[in-house]
Image (cartoon, grey):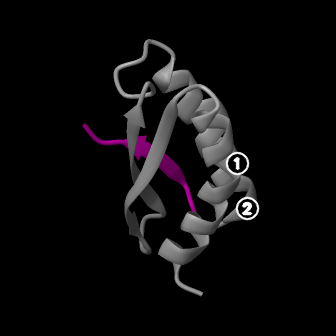
Amino acid sequence: MLLFDKVNKALERVKPMLEADGGSIELVSCDDETGKVLVKLKGSCHGCPMAELTLKQGVERIIKEEVKEVKVVEAVR
């Protein structure tokens, strides 16, 4: 399974939590060599003061638990 597909599957676990607060997330890209994942926060998550905390302690933590190749998750604007 490709890294992109693995991360997308892990995001399915994250999305309901974000959607409960009116937000969403979209997978933009994955770098197989560096393990860097880029996501786009949408809805109420976009521009939220808690977005960085949600990204690092929620989204990134869950993705890294499920997909060992992932080293970092960052948001794009």
Q: Quadrant of residue 6?
A: bottom right
- Badge number at residue 66: 2
Q: Nearer the viewer, residue 42 or 35?
A: 42
Image quadrant in which the N terminus is located:
bottom right
- Looking at the image, residue 64 sits to the left or right of residue 28; the answer is right
| 71 part of magenta stretch | yes
Residue 27 position, x and y percent, is 42, 58
- Looking at the image, residue 72 sits to the left or right of residue 11; the answer is left
Q: Is residue 74 above or below residue 10?
A: above
Disc 1 marks which amino acid?
A: Ile
Q: Residue at the spot x=48%, y=25% of the render? A: 52
Q: Residue at the spot x=61%, y=47% of the render? A: 15
Query: Disc 1 to disc 2, how far (Cα)?
Result: 6 Å
| 58 part of magenta stretch | no
Q: Is residue 22 above or below residue 28?
A: above
Disc 2 marks which amino acid?
A: Glu
Residue 18 appears anywhere in the view: yes
* Secondary structure category for the residue under label 2: helix
User: In the current view of this chain or complex, which residue is farthest to the right?
Assistant: 65
Q: Are marks 1 and 2 in contact (CB under 8 Å)?
A: yes
Q: Which residues are magenta?
A: 70-77
Residue 39 position, x and y percent, is 40, 49
Residue 38 position, x and y percent, is 38, 52
* Secondary structure category for the residue under label 1: helix
Residue 73 position, x and y percent, is 48, 47
Q: Nearer the viewer, residue 19 or 29?
A: 19
User: Which residue in the structure is indicated by mark 1?
Assistant: 62
User: In the current view of this chain or complex, which residue is farthest to the top?
Assistant: 49
